[in-house]
Image (spheres, helix red, strand yellow):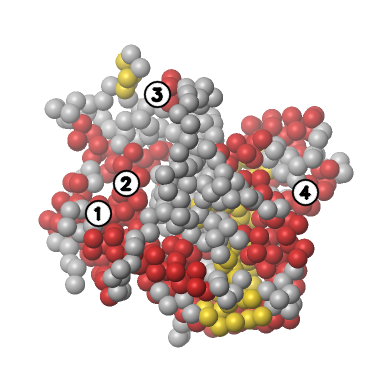
Amino acid sequence: MDSSMTIAEAHDKLAHREVSSTELVQACIDRIEKVDGTLNAVVYRNFDKALDQAKKVDSAGKFDHPLTGIPYLVKDVYCEEGVQTTACSNVLREKNYIPPFDSTTSKRLKAVGAISIGKTNTDEFTMGASTETSCYGVTRNPWDTTRVAGGSSGGSAAGVAAGEGIFALGTDTGGSIRQPAAFCGITGLRVTYGRTSRYGVMSMGSSIDTIGPLCRNVEDLCIVTQAIAGKDPLDATTGDVPVPDYRSELKKGVKGLRVGIPKEYFLEGMNAEVEASVKAATEVFKKLGATVIDISLPHTKYATATYYVICPCAVSSNMARYDGIRYGHTADKPQNLLEYYECVRSTGFGAEVKRRIMIGTYALSAGYVDQYYRQAQKVRTLIKKDFDDAFRTVDVIVSPVSPTPAFTIGAHDANPIDMYLEDIFLTSQVMAGIPALSVPCGFSKAQGSVPALPLGLQIMGAQWQEATILRAAHAYEQATEWHMKKPVL
Amino acid sequence: MTQLTGDQVRHIAKLARLQLTDAEVEKFAKELTSILQYVDMLQEVDTKNVQPTAQVTGQSNVFREDVIRRDGTSADSLLSCSPLPLADHQIVSPSAHG
């Protein structure tokens, strides 16, 4: 059976008894066994448990919810009771940290009968834009295995693109859902900060972390978001804001929708194919009856610098818990407690995690906190204000997701700043706490040994307006065929 | 322009409970300097009279009822995650005094 179907298609087959959940799960398992030796998207295989669950779902025989019996993949930072969860870091991997509880999202998906079949690869503790900092090694892009799948949710994106799961969960702190979705030719949604619960998902930047879905199309994003969104008493930052029926919102179309094009996202000398694909997408919106309006988001160029202060400051605090006392990596024969901490952390963390811990420690240390952290928080206010102003005249804003298509493995090894600049179009939304998604909008031209690579369109909306950007993306998707293309493996 | 010395990197590492080799100190001094020089662009932004943002959706002081929940994770299952020996429901850690 072809496992690369959408949730809606799979649900239809389940509901009509054309296929069982066990067969669906087995199809994904077969696919993982066939292609994951090459891709390295799935770092923990939870097959026995998944098949058990599928049998139960099949014998109950009720497929009322669109996610019942649907196999999915989940980024290795979501805690699942009894399932090893390592954040792809040696600090947890060595002792195979097995959480005794479920993340709220895992719990909500379990409650409707969705089936987790494996943990996906990520940059260590989600710190990266290429899945290269994982202790399990890089995830390869299904469209060209010499290239990265993006990151940090690279395993989730590659897994969905390759048909290893019907959908996947990821996290987006600085672009980690949107960029890998674009690199792998699928769709991914970063929700409004606080739209989904962070409870039980390992933290990187607590004021900017979001958790969300990666899917084959926009309708599927709606289905998953519907199931996981909403207030959670276990995460005080979740918003008490009504969750609309996302799928029925799609029917409204985009006639009269005001689409903003921010001039700051189209830089001199930028990749011509990326620019052309987004310009072509705006023409599609015009044809569908939307109004396209040029706008300005003047503080855009400061967003990535703001991000690389605020995020490491949070990292230096959030990583403090990995001290070898309550879980994870340990050290032999230390002289005293201080030496124990230092030994555990120095041998457990990789270079990018150490870099961010040290940048954050420095930026928060006495004498520097106003210069770095406080100033970044003030610039954050200005970036947010740019969007507040813009959303008075437009409903959605469109831009590229990434300055280039997927880059080759190792391309940014020499200089960490080059990797940081991969996020240049993805950090403003983070600072403003707004939702944004990535939807396929074209392919680069094949050249010599380099095959055609997927390109992504970013669509942003005002806080809590996921329904609006999903509607815009769905209308675009219906008018184009980019999302139908599948990599050959 | 910000320039970190090896001694500063050693000091930061100590604060962060990280041990670095001399080669790492040299590498991180270079890399952290380049990151700090990049984020130095924030200094040019006029933020006079701008309030800092910590919580972006405008929430503050989120309260809940102070009630004991019995449906949470048990203390024993949490303790069992520790790599260190347990004694009387406590984790036995290395001594702070050596």
| Secondary-structure class at tag 4 | helix
Relative to A202, residue A376 above or below: below
Q: Which residue is mark 1?
A: A364
* Dot 4: chain letter: A
- Marks 3 and 4 sit apart, C-alpha to C-alpha, by 41 Å
Q: Which residue is mark 2?
A: A317
- Marks 4 and 2 sit apart, C-alpha to C-alpha, by 42 Å
* Dot 1: chain letter: A
| Secondary-structure class at tag 3 | helix
Query: Label 3 amino acid?
Result: Leu
| Secondary-structure class at tag 2 | helix
Which mark sits nearer the N-terminus, 2 or 1?
2
Q: Which residue is mark 4?
A: A10
For the question of whether residue B97 can be seen, the reply is yes
For the question of whether residue A142 can be seen, the reply is no
* Dot 2: chain letter: A
Viewer-proximal residue among B17 and A346: B17
A475 relative to B92 in the view: left or right: right
Q: Which residue is mark 3?
A: B79
| View extreme (bottom): residue | A268
- Marks 1 and 4 sit apart, C-alpha to C-alpha, by 49 Å
Viewer-proximal residue among B18 and A3: B18
- Marks 3 and 2 sit apart, C-alpha to C-alpha, by 22 Å
Mark 3 and 4 residues: CB-CB less than 8 Å, in contact?
A: no
- In this rendering, which labeled residue sits more in front, label 3 or label 4? 3
Query: Label 4 amino acid?
Result: Ala
Q: Quick check: do tags 4 and 2 share a chain?
A: yes
Q: Quick check: do tags 1 and 4 share a chain?
A: yes
